[in-house]
Image (cartoon, rainbow, N blue to C red):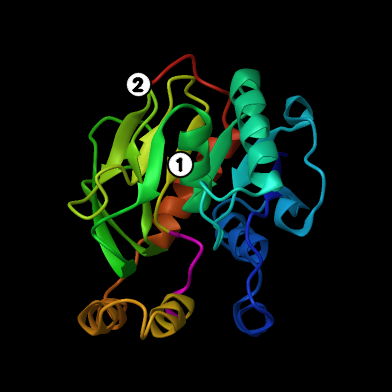
Amino acid sequence: MSRLTIVEAGLLSRRFRERHGSFPQMFERLIRAADPSINFDVVSVAAGEPLPDPRELQAILITGSAAGVYDKLDWIARLEEFVRAAYGSGAPMVGVCFGHQLIAQALGGVVRKSDKGWGIGRHVYGIAPGNGIVDGEHIAIPCSHQDQVIEPPAGARTILFSDFTPHAGLLYANGATFSVQPHPEFSASFAYELCEAREGDAPEAVVAEGKSSLAEPLDNARLGDAIARFVTRRAASGIS
């Protein structure tokens, strides 16, 4: 039986929580559907809770956030230190959206707001063959972001990619760290509401396309299965 510690890096509004749950609750639903044996602990760094010693954790998942990884917030600096310690410990670690970007920045990559603007709705990503984590040639997952990993850290392999998000998924050199830009925990209804929330911010055509895209099938469960397998396996010695 495995134990996954979810680091909550973002707090959703009360309206969203009541309708869809918190980020940790979304991940629990996604991952428990893939592997009911996994137990969960939640540490809300965004709410001021102290981070545990990563050397004492079996596996780690860092959620999304409305914050940018480059924001001058005390908890972001602490979370970067946590990531570096976790990476050194070899504990399986997964980052999603903000978590994806934070891990990359903490380990030497470059993250910034993309000149491509908002990515919202259903995006389709290519899958690098033989990566050992995600199967298939393509995967369709909801996303909601402006920031992107522009330059991955040394030794990180890009395993998910698209024209809009060239480094949408990274597998790191220690074989125990994996991160993705899109949100497999988002239901189609929640992703649709996020598109609506971008009205007046993102261009009208981008919002309309994001909404309509969510009528197409999503592969959330496939990526959820991959995450569940990853956090329960022993750390590999390197990238396959």
Is 188 in the magenta?
yes
| Residue ID at (38%, 21%) | 239
Region of the chain picked out in magenta, as a range:
183-189
Total count of labels: 2
The numbered dot on residue 126 is none
Per the image, the residue denoted by label 1 is 179
Q: Are marks 1 and 2 in contact (CB under 8 Å)?
A: no
Using the rendered image of the protein, determine whether residue 38 is visible from the camera's viewpoint: no
Classify the position of the N terminus by image quarter: top right
Residue 85, x across and y down, in percent:
66, 24
Residue 238, x across and y down, in percent:
43, 16
Residue 208, x across and y down, in percent:
25, 84
Q: Amino acid at mark 2?
A: Ser
Q: CA distance from mark 1 to mark 2?
A: 16 Å
| Residue ID at (70%, 45%) | 74
Mark 1 Cα shell of 10 Å, populated few (<14), some (14-19), many (≥20) = many
| Residue ID at (76%, 59%) | 47
- Vertical placement of 150 versus 56: above or below? below
Tag 2's secondary structure? Answer: loop
Is 202 in the magenta?
no
Tag 1's secondary structure? Answer: strand
Farthest residue, direction front: 72
Per the image, the residue denoted by label 2 is 240
Which quarter of the picture shows residue 21?
A: bottom right
